[in-house]
Image (cartoon, rainbow, N blue to C red):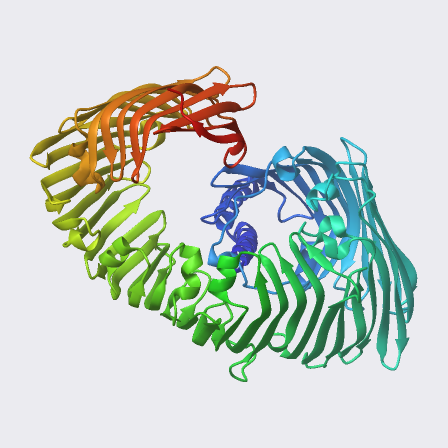
Amino acid sequence: MRGRSTAILTAGALALGLHAAQAQLGVPSEAEQQGVLAGVISRLLTTPTARVEIGGIEGVLSRRATITGIRVGDEDGIWLSLARAEIDWSLTALLRGRLEVSELTLSELEIARRPVPTDRPEDVAEGPLVPEVPIEVNIEAFTLDRLRLGEAVLGTPAELSAQGSARLGAEDGATFLAFEAQRLDAEGTLSVDLDYSPQTTVLALDVTHAEPEGGIVARLLDLPGLPPVSLTIAGEAPLDAFDAQIALEAGPEIGAQGRATVRRGDAAYALDLDVAARIAALVPETAAPLFEGTTQLVGEASFGDDGAIAIARLALGTEIAELALAGTVAPDRALDLALSGETRLDTTLRLDETTVDALALDLRITGFPTAPRLAGFLDGQGVGLAQGRVERLRLDVDVAPEAATVPAERYRFELAAQAEGVALTDPALAAALGDGARVEASGTADVIGIADVTRATIETPTLAGTYSGILAARTLDGLFEARIPSLEPFGDIAGLALAGSADLTARLGADPAEETLTAALQGRLSDFATGIAALDGLFGPDVTLTGTAASLADGIGFDGLRLDGANLALTLHGSATQTRADLALDARVPRLAALHPRLDAGEGVIEARLTGSLERPSLAARATLTDVVALERPVPRLDLTIDATGLGPDLDARIGLDGTVSDAPARGGLRVVGREGGWSVEDIDVAIGSVGLTGALQVDEDLRSEGGLRLAAGDLDDLSPLVLAALSGRLEAAIDLVREADGSQSATLEASGQDLAVEAIGIGAIDASIAGTDLIEAPRLDGEAVAQRVDVFGEAFERVEARAVATANATDFTVSARAGDLLYETSGTLVPETPVPRLDLRDISVGPAPD
């Protein structure tokens, strides 16, 4: 702002200089000088973010001056243009400290759009918040012939004209303003008349505004539904006995009626305010329930001749709650104010999914406006959330200037928040977090919100954490430490029987310029256990985490992040963003025998590298097993590789298998290709010894599939070392999948096998032919399966038969099994239900088997 003011003063000095030069030296004509002056002023008023053009200036040194071709632009082009401005004024009066304008006329003013916002430091905060009027201003007549507002300004084009007159800043204190505006392209008028005479102390005020639906004021205030708006403020009386009536109507949901009264007494003016309003539609949706019905604003305050203000009570009340302000402002502007609020008795406050049975606020404000102290509390009782309920939630705050300087440069703060009687609806979360929490913080902060936290703590029955360091919206530089003395309460969340304790230290840092957040981590799990033998064999009782993780502006990064357990070493290094990726993962399990009792030896290694970018990634990964002995069978080497590029429809991934299992080759692979609305699994061809799988599938995004798979196993025992279970027998199977025209999933299965065995279950022979319809939404089956010489955990059956018949809404089935001289039979119905089908048994019988 200082630069713009300097430019204007410089332009004025140039004008006076040209006048003096013309008078004494006979240099170029006035027309030539005015052309030069227009160019000079244009350049002076132009900044890096705003461009000002002035076409011409005529008669700038005479009583009547004309400026033409004014255009103001920014980086997106011209947004304001004024065809012509004429002023009839007195230059000599300006030199005496008065702006005397007989007539000011603006012809065609057009504002096509709002200017591009700028955050340049020199554009803000170099002057008073409310501009002062340093000289007397007297404008006898002002006329705006036509103002055109582009659609981008208000959301609809508009045209209006205006006229008026004003007197401001007079030595005797008199103030006069008359202003009228009217829409030219639609209905709508605004009239403001203000007249104050210090001699009589009479203030006359008359403001009227009226516009139909979709008008300018409704759009400027973004009123819901853009209702018609009418406003009147009227009053005329000496200030020692002044009454003003206020009336506002903006559709059926917004309005206000009331009065403001000013009385003189005891070297002060007393203000009495009483306004009833409907404003629920104006506040954010989440807070609207607070302001349903009528909101009443009442107040009593006095304004002393010495500048002192005494507020007996200024209260904002609704049907649900009341907020009140009381206190004083001393002549030296020292504050002593109390702000209090509470909900009404027997009233439950509802905000979205949150309910509060009772809410109370008590805040004391002392000190000076530029160095205040705030101390108080906010207390909520019976807070209901979507996740549960809190019987009491309280926040205590004490913020005061660190030093006695005015304005204050830094503030010290002490905060304490406490939740009692926490009852979460999720049992797992309730166990993990406990029934209460307390947060405390202390430190100092500057006026732009950067806090130096001496210590901040959070405590629950199950964990404790502390933070110290710098903290701001976009700045972070501190140390965070957390301690979980027992992992057992977190077991239900993880779905594991957790045991042990956890400690974590993180050195946190943020770089606003780079939009990064980094954490240098040191963590340890002690006496750790999960209840799952494979995981416990992998991690062991002591697990450590070290290294750095980072959240980048458009991705993630790691610098030597390492997880170490008794039988695991995993590292992450590199970064991945939307434009570039180079991220490597390495994991090693040196003793596979610790993961399963049927593994006697071997080592596992995983190497993966992500390149390209997160927008179009490429992944190359290899998992290798070496020198494995499983079920006393050797697996010298087995490699599983993935080579993939792209995401979604651009996905192209090849998965390969290569190695040796029990002296037999393991070879093959498949390809996954993305497409619109799903993906394809192509070229399935995997062979492990005598077992082979071939086929192809197309899978839609709703998991409906089309295609088929073929399995041919000469001896299933070739798979035993991989599945860690004893298998045997010959099996051939074919599955065909069909996505029906109505979107449902159908499938058929044809299978036959001989001498099959899986651990303690054996089948001498089996033949099955089964068809299924609508398998995902409402499955129904049709077909039969017959098995000979079935042995289940020592129970032998000569023959087992199962038959299914699909009906309109279910599957009827019968099952019979012959064991020696007995025949077991049952029948029933399989009914499709969500999430799992329901099995209804009708008959169960045991009788002699027929010959």
Q: x, y (%) of residue 734?
A: 30, 19
Q: x, y (%) of residue 152?
A: 61, 36
> Would you identify the image quadrant in which residue 665 lies?
top left
- Screen quadrant of the N terminus: bottom right
Please tell me which residue is depicted at 56% across the width and 22% down the height of the picture.
809
Q: Is residue 50 above or below residue 798?
A: below
> Would you identify the image quadrant in which residue 764 lies?
top left
Please tell me which residue is depicted at 73% across the width and 51% down the height of the picture.
101
Please tell me which residue is depicted at 51% across the width and 23% down the height of the picture.
812
Q: x, y (%) of residue 494?
A: 40, 55
Q: Is residue 55 visible?
A: no
Q: Which residue is more in the foreground, 842 or 34? A: 842
Q: Is residue 525 above or below residue 47?
A: below
Q: Which residue is more in the foreground, 209 or 199? A: 209
Q: x, y (%) of residue 190?
A: 81, 44
Q: Is residue 578 above or below residue 655?
A: below
- Screen quadrant of the C terminus: top left
Q: Which residue is more in the foreground, 638 or 225? A: 638
Q: Is residue 156 visible?
A: yes
